Image (cartoon, rainbow, N blue to C red):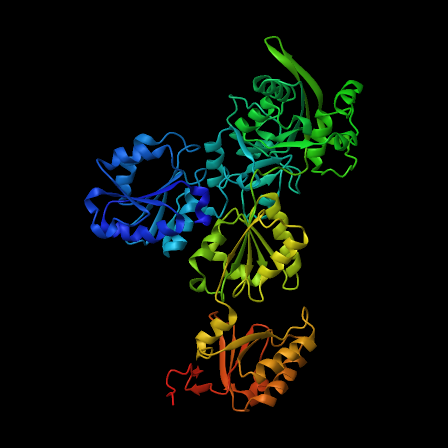
Amino acid sequence: MLLFQDFHPLVAIATTPTAAQTLEPLCHTAGAMLWLPESVHTPERKDVPTESFYQGSLKSHIASLWQNHRAFIFCLATGAVVRLIAPLLKDKSSDPAVIVVDETGQFVISLCSGHQGKADQLARMIALQLGATPVLTGGSTGLNLPAIDMVGIPFGWQRGEGDWTGVSAAVARGERVEVIQEVGSTLWQQHLPPGHPFVFDGGEETVDSNSANARIWISFTQRRFSPDSDLPKIQWHPRVLWVGIGCERGTSRELIETAIIQTCQRYHLAVDAIAGIATIDIKADEVGLVEFCQARDLPLRTFPAEVLRSVNVPTPSTVVNQEVGTPSVAEAAALVCSERFSASGTKVPTTNLLVQKQIVRADNQPGAVTVAIAVAQREYTGRIGQLFLVGIGPGELDQITPAAKTALSQADAVIGYSLYIDLITPILHPGQIIERLPITQERQRAQRAIELAEWGLTVAVVSSGDCGIYGMAGLVLEELKAQGWDGKMPGVQVFPGITALQAAASRVGAPLMHDFCAISLSNLLTPWDVIEKRLNAAAQADFVIALYNPRSHTRIEQLAIAHSILLQYRSPQTPVAIVRSAYREDEEITLSTLDKLLDIPIDMLTTVLIGNQSTRLHGDWMITPRGYFVNDE
């Protein structure tokens, strides 16, 4: 359900028993309410908690649900859905996502609000849950490009004025689109496919404005586009402006709002680029300020006087200093937020200050407001970041759990070893940030994922096999703990996968039917003397043993030592299975015996399974008896 929380409240509609059967598992997973007509109400359905039954016409019922739900999943004919929702559609910026699933669950169609309503994303997620084919018809989809009205969403950007349809059409036609990005993350630029139509101002290629077919401004400036221009233009506003506020006690929300809007207009700043409001801590309960922040969904950051007092400002005030213990509230608070400093007393440069303090009063309202505005180097996303720790199993797509596939599809960023990223490429989609790090940079992967998640992104960290068994889950959690993580933010979800020993075992039969253990022969993180103790203990205890990381180009003697230890306790004829790249195209499987183990090519992509005293080979199968056929005497 957590994977689908961005679409809640979510509703599903079925009109036949077959359609209901198709949607029921999905509703359980996604936390959606399934609505059915009274005509399919049967006794066996009366206790199903996720089902409700409507009376009267479906058209009237949909109309009653429309305003209060973010997404609709229909399992009926597309034409019927079109006729049902047509009178309800208003604007793509406010309409809910609409998805159509055929009765057999083979196709999932993103019908309406594909971009801004995230219907395309929801269709991908549902298709992964059902094992279906997503049908996405947006113009940018076939070009492997992110939708232009979605590129800033992961970073919390706000859509500004402009001809969004015209610019989107230019992108879909592959025409030159000039991008002038003054602030905000450029990560979206770094993950565009080859041959994309964007030309970036200030880049290696000089932009000839006359040759551009459309233009995108990414700025905190509010521009007014000429209605006489035929060139379609749009503007994105990254939330980089921190507004410092000082006000008299009892100042109204209306006056605070007027002061901020007037100041932004005077300096041609976009109100949508405001990241949040900053002030002194004694104003944390100022009613007008709190109401303004709640109405605009803006964070209110407050700081003690000693922190604000440490900041150099251009216009300090002795009067303010006498009143509240700091010569500046508005300017100092805006600067502290812009640099994201905590109460450390660090000196903040004044170069970030765009607008020095402005005092605003109104004839018809009591009080006064002081406004100052500073710009941050990094935008405020306004989101709580998530870390998805994902095990992808042996690597074949049909061996990955639906939940793991859905998590990968939903993530803003996917981080992992390049081989693992290549294996899951069909699950990924345009607009995602894909970062490949070498196999020796596991800690860097963890740190990068945490950095992005703390900023507010949803980040999937990929491990082969199971992420919690010799994978990235433990390292990420250790790194979080070392950084003082509170256990809540960023959020963490772990998605298990088929681990290497399970995958290898499945290819050779049932070698793990009795007690078994896994031992990694890599001594990069574990001292070799510890590994030797574990090998001796496991061999003596007659465990079936799975050896991970058995041999690398530079680490070859460890397998020989392990082989010698095992022969002290196991018969030379003990069955062994050597499985390389299980379920992948270059899979190699060898069944042999312990005495011949070192004669077989083995590398880091190999898992070695060593039987116990009861394990036997039978043709191409390796079997460890569980004991069901042993007679009790």
Return the x and y of residue 130 as percentages of the image width and height: 36, 55
Q: Nearer the viewer, residue 198 or 42?
A: 42
Quadrant in the picture for the C terminus: bottom left
Is residue 411 something one can see in this rendering? yes
For the image shown, how many numbered marks are present on the structure? 0
Residue drawn at x 59%, y 8% is 364
Q: Image check: 493 left or right of 63?
A: right
Residue drawn at x 79%, y 35% is 347
Return the x and y of residue 594 as percentages of the image width and height: 55, 87
Q: Quadrant of residue 256?
A: top right
| Residue projecting furthest to the left | 39
Residue drawn at x 48%, y 70% is 585
Return the x and y of residue 470 as percentages of the image width and height: 58, 67
Q: Nearer the viewer, residue 34 or 453?
A: 34
Residue drawn at x 22%, y 37% is 55
Q: Nearer the viewer, residue 324 or 175?
A: 324
Residue 93 in the image: above or below residue 406: above
Is residue 103 something one can see in this rendering? no
Q: Image check: 116 left or right of 571?
A: left
Q: Image check: 175 left or right of 65?
A: right
Q: Nearer the viewer, residue 177 or 138?
A: 138
Q: Quadrant of residue 401?
A: bottom left
